[in-house]
Image (cartoon, helix red, strand yellow):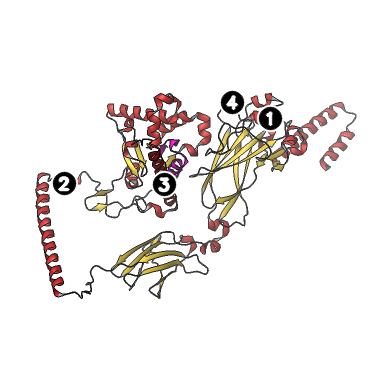
Amino acid sequence: MLLFRGLKQVFKAGEGNIMWSSTLTLDLLLLGSLCLGVHAERTSYRPQSCTLECIQQGDPECEYCRITADDVQFSLSIPSNSPYGSCVPWPCYSFLGQETPEVCQHYVNAPHSISIEFEDSEDTPYDAITVSWSPSQYGIAYLHGFQVTLQALGGSQVVCQLFLLRNNLSLTPAHAQTVYYSDPFTHLSLDTEYVVTIMALPVPERWDQFHEKKHFFTRTCPEKNGLEECKKDWYPNYIEVHQENRDVLVTFNLAPENFKIRHYFSSCFGGGLRNYTDIKPDFSVNKTHHTYRLPNLQAGTNYTCEIAADIVDAVRKTFFVVVQHNSEEPLTSHFTESPSLIVLLSVGILLAATAVLTFTVVFKKRKKKKTVKTKLRPDIIEQYYDKNMEEGQCVLLDNNTRPPRLLICYSNNDGPTHVRVVLQLAAFLQKHMATEVHLDLWEALSIMEEGNLGWHCRRMKECDFVLVVCSRGLLQNLKNKCEDEEPMKNTTLATIAIIGEEMCRAKALGQDLSKYMAAIFEYSQESDIPAVLGLASRYTLTKDLPLLFSHLHGVALQKPGFYLQVDNISESGYSKLPAGLALQLAIQEAKALIFDEQTEEEHVGIPIIS
């Protein structure tokens, strides 16, 4: 205000000079536009609560509004039970094109400068964020709003927020520096990778450059709540028990180094007695795991044990120990029968020992004869194995190692339980088997942009491996393709046909076929694998998880006398991880459901496809 008053006085002083007046007027206009530009750069908008009617009427009080599901009812082509939910690009004509259809015919480019701001939250186990962005200067005059979607990598749940600008608002390129904010996204898991996608509305007919993505991690517990608060909430989640004579060896994972927890304790109760053990790990030997001994436990006794960090109010992890009888200890005889029974028992034992000895001698002779026929020199045997493989070696994948890219194809004809198993498998492979997984459930926007078949074809070219999850529904779909529909109208059938054609071409040219794999879960049969995939490597999951790991990373699992140890990737070990347990529960649910369906079909006389 003071600046304009000063300029006004100068203008009055030169009122008689026309040239001076014109120059001053031009300066005022330039200065005014500069001030408006500075104002536009600093302008930011946070969502308002207003009605759709207010937006359509162009009321200035409804400049930037949040739209909820109750505000407007959409008629979508995607069913409500879709894994994408209602988070799809909203059609412009649904809420803007009834009265002025021309507003939906213009192209609006993608937003830019996406930023994530973490919000204060009293909900300790979860995080909260607010997203901000700026609109593109291209097509900004026709901008009518934004849609913000948030998805956790490894999950199918998508959260949406929709924001609209008032109907008669027309922005200029100067507003490209304006910052728009979303509402807070709450209840986000800590230390988890998310992707946020922002689309400019109206969604154009051209399906490119209309949205922008940003990947980010939520804060860790120490970052959000402070180190002291997280120490007491931490507890070992990996515990392995091994018996050695009468002693029991317990291995558990240590707390992260920044927690600075140096002491632990263990307490076991069984047989009317309590056993307390003070644990002081040697961090110079191992910084991630520690093994301690529980001595002199009673044989044949079940113990309930707890382990925790030795700090105030620490969360305790409960595990169970069953002490078996030591086979090396002499068995105590309690026979009170007549001597004749003891004699008969002794004769029986002698005869059994003689039979075992005879069988052992015959077996060794046959084995020796077979070995002579197939004997090779040790140097020839050695060349077929990895000479750098040593006992206990682990595969270490650092940040500089690019994980193999894997495309997973499947059929949803077996119902949502089978789809859930595929989803949990993809999450386990990506999180614990160092694999970059591509799954259609995780890339909804890309599929909408390219089409289902186009997306699968591009991913097949880009990925190092393709895994087809075979099932009864997939095989049935292939058998009925001639009766129901043309193969190329079904994405699953078209994808299988393309994979079969690629394998036949590679076989004819003598090329490697390891790119393509077929897998079944334990509730399916090997006969469910289509004949067109006959050249692909076959795996039964979860039994063959180590073999699948070997295939993806190109490492040998064993050589004579040596074995590759891969933590938590085995038929019995994978369920110790949260993602593995989720996979196991999904498989059990699908297995129970499929068994019930087969039983019902048998009762009504429907033949079972084998």
Q: Is residue 420 magenta?
A: yes
The stretch in magenta equals 400-428
Q: CA distance from mark 3 to mark 4?
A: 45 Å
Circle 3 packing at 10 Å, graded few (<14), some (14-19), many (20+), is: few
Q: Say which residue label 2 marks.
A: 379
Between the C-alphas of marks 1 and 2, the distance is: 77 Å
Residue at the disc numbered 1: 96
Q: Nearer the viewer, residue 91 or 513?
A: 91
Q: Position of residue 242 (x, y in %)?
A: 33, 63
Residue 321 seen: yes
Asked if the residues shown at circle 3 and circle 2 are in contact, with their CB atoms under 8 angstroms apart, the answer is no
> Residue shown at 12%/56% (left/top)?
360
Q: Mark 2 or 4, which is nearer the eye? A: 4
Which residue in the protein does label 4 denote? 205
Q: Amino acid at mark 2?
A: Asp
Element marked by disc 2: helix
The amino acid beneath tag 1 is Leu
Disc 3 versus disc 4: nearer the observer:
3
**Nearer the viewer's eye, disc 3 or disc 1?**
3
Q: Amino acid at mark 3?
A: Ala
